[in-house]
Image: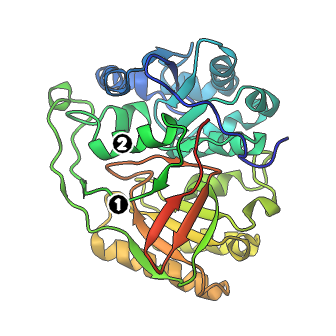
Amino acid sequence: MPAYASIRPAALRPGDTVAVVSLSSGGAAALPHRYATGKRQLAETFGLRVIEAPHATRDSDWLRDNPRARADDLHWALENPDVHGIVSAIGGFHALGMVPYLDLDLIAAHPKVFTGYSDTTINHLAFGKAGVGSFYGMAVLSTAAENGGISPFSAESFRATVMSAEPVGDLAPAPEWTEELLDWSRPELQDRPRRWVPNYGWLWLQGDQPVQGPIVGGCLEVLVQAVGTRIWPEPADFDGAVLHLEISNERPPQLQVQVWLRHFAALGIVARISALLFSRPEAMSLRDTLALYEAIRDELVVAGRPDLPFVANLDYGHSSPMGVLPLGRQLLVDPRQRRLSILDPAVC
């Protein structure tokens, strides 16, 4: 296999075709009006043609019981010469079941833009293991189907990351964010924008030396599931890496997050990485959020890494708005200038 997440796929361009895949849950079947909105807004915002993999609109029970079919859908999209990119419909709980059926050689032979988050972390790990860089963010039912239109922050992040062969460059916090929850099952709310408030930005919590390394990571709960499987990175793949973590809207307890970080420390991961990024948790109070960040700092100290640059409150994963992080690309983390910058192009 090529080096971990080293291959850059071809950039998406207006007029290209992207395929929607349901690799975990059946959100497209459960919420057809929102799924239709996501496809339409994805097409209109970026000038893309959106099609579906064969089983993309199956319900959750069928998808749960047919992991091979989910893997086949991913392989179909990769091998289809008319498909230029792949977008996950949404996350869920069942992606781990695909692991025995994923063809890493096929992924390596057909590198294409692949986006998704949450449970889709499993598939990002498979792409990385196959040597292909993938993109954490942009799912059809969440970001693409944002009420009242895709947010400008999410749209610009997607364009800069997967639709341009120029270096991505400096990242910036989203100017505004929201935690207003509008019921996805109510079609009459689909065109009503949520209420947005000014973003209080990133938090630089420790570390003072600039570092850089390839981005690895995903949803913490899902990463822990994958440890020891055939898609888990080799220990050396974490050497000098910038580890990005986030937690799902299930809001695991603070103690559980600490236990998972201790697990990573015991695996030698915390000792190997060059920096830690943590995205803003969804639907968590400010008090609980700050307490979680402080608990993470405590774990870094216990692991012998009080020097590790640690930046929190980023806008990736279960966060609104949601940007796109190019996994495998080199990220500069500069605590002195409080700067995050992706140094290389994410696509070619």
Mark 2 — residue?
156
Q: State how far apart marks 2 and 1 are (Cα).
A: 12 Å
Q: Nearer the viewer, residue 224 or 140?
A: 140
Give x and y (percent) for residue 88.
51, 31
For the point 68% across and 46% down, the residue is 125
For the point 25% across and 57% down, the residue is 175
Amino acid type, mark 2 = Glu
Q: Which dot marks residue 219?
A: none
Q: Quadrant of residue 48?
A: top left
Give x and y (percent) for residue 93.
54, 41
Report the side of 310 relative to 228 (left or right): left
Q: Nearer the viewer, residue 199 or 178?
A: 199
Q: Is residue 217 above or below residue 121?
A: below
Q: Is residue 234 above or below residue 144?
A: below
Q: Which dot marks residue 173?
A: 1
Q: Residues within 10 Å of mark 2 (few under 14, many from 20)?
A: some
Q: Earlier in the sequence, mark 2 or mark 1?
A: 2
Q: Is residue 100 above or below residue 282?
A: above
